[in-house]
Image (cartoon, rainbow, N blue to C red):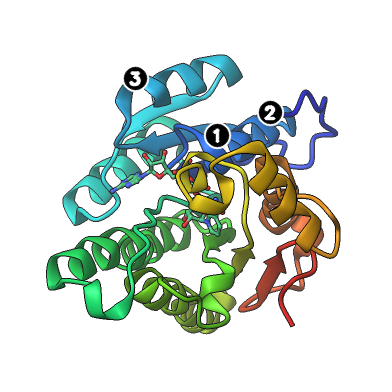
Amino acid sequence: MSDYAGRGRLAGKVALITGGARGQGAEEGRLFAAEGATVILTDVLEEVGGQSAAEIGAEFLVHDVGDEAAWETVVADVIAHHGRLDVLVNNAGIFQPKQLLKTSVEDWDRTIRINQVGVFLGLKVGGRAMIEAGNGGSIVNISSVAGMEGVFGSMAYGASKWAVRGMTKVAAKEFGRDGIRVNSVHPGIIETDMVSGMPAMSDDAKRERLARSLPVGRLGTPTDIANLVLFLASEESGFCTGQEFVIDGGTFR
Ligand SMILES: NC(=O)c1ccc[n+]([C@@H]2O[C@H](COP(=O)([O-])OP(=O)(O)OC[C@H]3O[C@@H](n4cnc5c(N)ncnc54)[C@H](O)[C@@H]3O)[C@@H](O)[C@H]2O)c1
């Protein structure tokens, strides 16, 4: 976690970050709050989410991103309390590594429901609230390098993350005239709970070997991602929309 002091880059903005209880989402919340935003973290992990929010002076709401009614409740709550929504980070996601022949329809549905339908609902319900508030906004969708290329053993995950990339481009075109920008972020391996169970991360020697295999010689951190998401959330990226931002230590292509 970063102890960055901030320069008011999101002063006056209201930002909602899904999957914000831990990992990248929590770090984005920390940076956003340091930059002057009012931050609302949402997640299915109530206790951890409440703690993370308390640490950074944010609000926390329980929220399953695959549930449309829950999206309506969360966004209505934000508008009722703050009157606007300026930034939405569709960050919540799950990763269940499985090869194609071992992927059941149940595995498929669970991953698609959270990673893909969750982002679709965020774009729909969050985007509508931004349009109604009339202040424009920035939506950042967290995809993956698995949404840029085929990654072995990630059939459902890869499908969901490619979909995030595609939905980003459609939404950018549809929301552009309302002053709402939509971009996708494509991290490589970032040290969070999501990947801590991967064989390549299971001990220090393996993690070190993996880190040395990257052009930059180290693994990614939540702060690496949060810095890019902050740029996309802020008006510094005002001419960027419908684009994909790969952030993987130099591995892709
Ligand atoms: N860690 C990586 O290497 C990596 C690489 C590429 C992309 N990503 C993506 O980055 C995003 C953040 O992941 P992370 O690395 O911080 O992992 P993480 O597991 O620490 O965080 C994901 C968060 O999403 C929450 N979540 C899961 N299902 C949810 C649901 N139905 N509704 C609301 N919240 C839910 C989890 O509780 C968790 O807090 C994810 O979209 C992930 O796919 C991660």
The quarter of the rendered structure image containing the N terminus is top right
The quarter of the rendered structure image containing the C terminus is bottom right
For the residues labelled 3 and 1, the Cα–Cα distance comes to: 13 Å
Type of amino acid under label 1: Ala
What residue is rendered at 21% in x and 61% in y? 110
The tag on residue 1 is 2
Q: Is residue 47 above or below residue 89?
A: above
**Side of 218 where 89 appears, left or right:** left
Type of amino acid under label 2: Met
Q: Secondary structure at mark 1?
A: helix
Q: Position of residue 130 (x, y in %)?
A: 47, 57
Q: Position of residue 64 (x, y in %)?
A: 26, 45
Q: Are marks 2 and 3 in contact (CB under 8 Å)?
A: no
Q: Is residue 180 visible?
A: no
Residue occupied by mark 3: 47
What residue is rendered at 41% in x and 26% in y? 49
The yes-or-no answer for disc 1 within 8 Å of ligand 1 is yes
The quadrant holding residue 179 is: bottom right
